[in-house]
Amino acid sequence: MALMQNVTVSELKINMRIVEFTKFAKPYTNMEEKICKFVQHNFRGSAAEIMRGGKKATCPVAKIIPGDSLLKVIKIPDTLRKLTTVSKGLPPELKKRGFLEFTVEPPPKKAPTSKQEQHQENVNQANEFIQNMKKGVAARDKATDAARDVLDNARKKPPSPEEVKENINAVMSESSPEAISAIASLKSSDQTYAHCVDAAAIFQTAYHAIKQKKGENSLFENPQMATFGAFMHDFGKAKVPKNVLESTVRFERESKEMHLLQSHPVFGAELLEGMGMAKHIINMAHYHHVKMDPSLNSSYPQGVNYDDVLMETRLVSIVDVYQALIGRRSYKKSWAPAAAIRYIDALAGAEFDPDVWDDFVSVMGIYPKGSLVELSDESMAFVMNVPDDDLESPQVAVFRDADGNDLERPILIDLQEEDELEIEQDLDHYEVLGEEAMEIFLRLEIS
Ligand SMILES: [Fe+2]
Ligand SMILES: [Fe+2]
């Protein structure tokens, strides 16, 4: 059977099949009669999971009554195919009606009949990815502003979880975490706000892919909560004085400032506990700097048993370091994603859980999406898609030839299909393309 997954309305893709509607906007809580009728009409023949009088119940949609809160629509009959088979126009319609999240089956894979068709499909996917990145750039900026609000306001008074979730998720859902995660490698980030946004996007993308690949359940109730949990990993920094947080000098190991900085996981856990957050989300904030060998100086808080560090936390600690390396900071140069992967690879087993690390690499690839690479014929390309089974041979968009001339139209090459051509080395996009890297990427129109 096809693997089910949970997606938001903006993550719906053409030809996916919606199996369940799992999250709704406000009007579906404590429904008015008009809404009940609307649901009954649109989902005729389906069943509804509802909250009635404080209790969960399942009934045919025909039986819902005003005052019920709609939790899920399930068992949707085939006759409603128009509503469940994702077409181009469907997602905006669903969004308008307040249908926010779904359980879906991926589109049926039809075997392309020719190489040409396969190529065209890859090209379409790559162009779609670039379009997504375009939306992602604006969404990331907005999310970063929201992050600044949340963290700075928390200095005065801890926000309600709803406030934070709404702030962050509203903007994140305008794009896809996958796109933001690729943007993270092409744009610089600060140490706090954009770092949280980018780390959250990378975490959600990787976590989701790992769980799907392994056929395991997510610990989070929905994809947004995974984003939220990762976003909050550095929440404790809200309690660290700004001048310490934003300092560009490195503090001495025993200094007061270093002590404050290294208290952020404990501060974060306290804040999240006070907000009534789930245990695993607290664990992520509390233990994301605990190393596999907790006796290391770089491991804090001290005295933690690594068995108490959840897989989710182990993953967020990897993402944390990965993001910090690829996002350029004021006091050091950024790393190309592939270089960051090699660097952390050397630390896996001592600092990071090697199994979780292998999972991370298996979904991100050795050359993550958006990486800039030089090919063996000296042309230059961006990585567009990473196959599961051959991490060293992604699909790349070649945009500059060996003589340094930009191609009029970049071409997509599947390195799995090429005998002669391979990746020669990864490049630091900033060093090679400067501030323009992002624009060059977004301008690609691949054929
Ligand atoms: Fe941290
Ligand atoms: Fe962090």
Image (cartoon, rainbow, N blue to C red):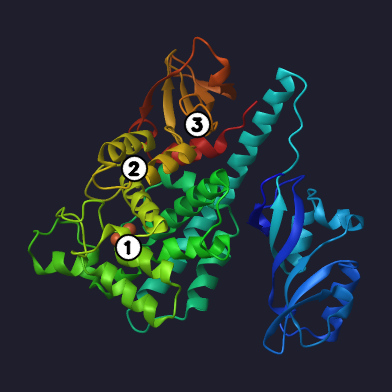
Q: Which residue is the site of mark 3? A: 383
Position of the N terminus, as image quadrant, is: top right
Position of the C terminus, as image quadrant, is: top right
In front: label 3 or label 1: 1
Q: Is residue 414 above or below residue 170?
A: above
Q: Amino acid at mark 2?
A: Pro
Q: Quick one: SS at disc 1?
A: helix
Q: Nearer the viewer, residue 182 or 200?
A: 200
In front: label 2 or label 3: 2
Q: Is residue 146 left or right of residue 99?
A: left
Residue at 54% across / 33% down in the picture? 388
Q: Position of residue 17 (x, y in %)?
A: 77, 50
Q: Residues within 10 Å of mark 1 (few under 14, many from 20)?
A: few
Q: Earlier in the sequence, mark 2 or mark 3?
A: 2
Q: Which residue is the site of mark 1? A: 308
Q: Earlier in the sequence, mark 1 or mark 2?
A: 1
Q: Is residue 429 left or right of residue 86?
A: left
Q: CA distance from mark 3 to mark 1?
A: 37 Å
Q: Earlier in the sequence, mark 3 or mark 1?
A: 1
Q: Amino acid at mark 3?
A: Val
Q: CA distance from mark 1 to mark 2?
A: 16 Å
Q: CA distance from mark 2 to mark 3?
A: 25 Å
The answer to which quarter of the image holds residue 223 is bottom right
Q: Quick one: SS at disc 3?
A: strand
Q: Which residue is the site of mark 2? A: 354
